[in-house]
Amino acid sequence: MHIRMHMDSEFSGIRERRFKITRKYLVYVLFALPAIAYVIGLSIIPAITVVYQSFLVAGKFSLYNYSVLPSYGLYASIGNTLIVSVGALLIQLILALAIAMVMMKPFAGSKIFSSIVIIPFGISTIVSAFIFSLIFTNVGGFANGVLVAFGFKPVVWFSSSISDLGVVMFSDFWKNTPLVALILYGGLSSVSPTLYEAASVDGAGAFKRFTHITLPAIAPLISIALLVRGVSEFNIFALPLVLIGYHPLILNTLIYENYSTLATRPISYAAATVLLLIIMAYSIFVLKIGGAKQYAK
């Protein structure tokens, strides 16, 4: 009888703990419901609708919209998007890592330096695009002014597809590097100084400490930064639209150009689906090899 009462008491305690845990998670879910509703209503449902509409021609299922996409500049726009996105990401990552490592060092004016670093990220995309359009103006632009001051000839910045994409890439990494720097700074801040001290005692130089301590420690955050910024890079739109217009095309300007008329709107749906597939493939790739899974654990 005593044993049975003891077992009933234990079971009662387990049920009570389970109820508390369930209630706690239910509260978390309730707080998350607005965000979940936002994502479902403004992201998932529209995405599914666009994918579905991309396969319709006169109300019937067809691959026609995809078959004509190459004639609208699909391959060139994919290549241009990859050039801008991958190039800007690499520059952002390298420059942001250097900035984050400088921010880790205590020095006079470090707070001012950190504040200046963050400024570009706070500027509106349209405003920064307009500023860079003035900087790279062929006559009277700041970029050519600097070149002339150092004895070089002025450059016609918007003279070819490569230079056009280069201007977009430069403008993009200038604006978004601070976000990556802040993410990496958080990772560097979590690395214990004792690890570096122990490595120094063992005779490890600066390069070995960087490759064997710093990089492995911040690898998960690098993958998160690449994921967050990579998705945004593939969705880049305002900067190229202001700086170079519709030529050379990138995927989002191709989508917008065809969406503006009813006759070509299904073509824009197909191009948007292609962009979605590219973003999904990139995200899976980063999550697969980038260490975000280990970070989540």
Image (spheres, rainbow, N blue to C red):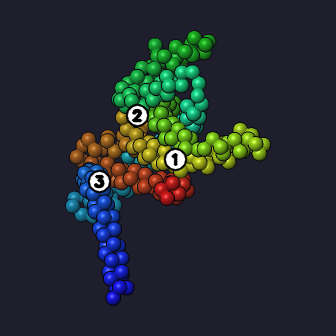
| Tag 2: amino acid | Pro
**Quadrant of the rendered image containing residue 45:** bottom left
Cα–Cα span, label 3 and label 2: 35 Å
Q: Nearer the viewer, mark 3 or mark 2?
A: 3
Return the residue at label 3.
32
Residue at 57% across, 49% down: 219
Q: Which amino acid type corresponds to the residue marked 1 in the rendered image?
A: Leu
Question: Which of disc 1 and disc 2 is earlier in sequence?
Answer: 1
Left or right, residue 43 beside residue 158 = left
Residue beneath label 2, please? Answer: 240
Q: Residue at x 33, y 64 (%)?
A: 21
**Residue wearing tag 1:** 221
Label 3 sits on what residue type? Ala
In the image, taking residue 200 as reference, residue 86 lies left or right, namely left
Disc 1 is placed on an element classified as: helix
Q: Position of residue 50 (x, y in %)?
A: 28, 54
Residue 252, which numbered label? none
Q: Is residue 65 above or below residue 191?
A: below
* Image quadrant in which the N terminus is located: bottom left
Residue at 40% x, 34% y is 240
Q: Nearer the viewer, residue 85 or 13?
A: 13
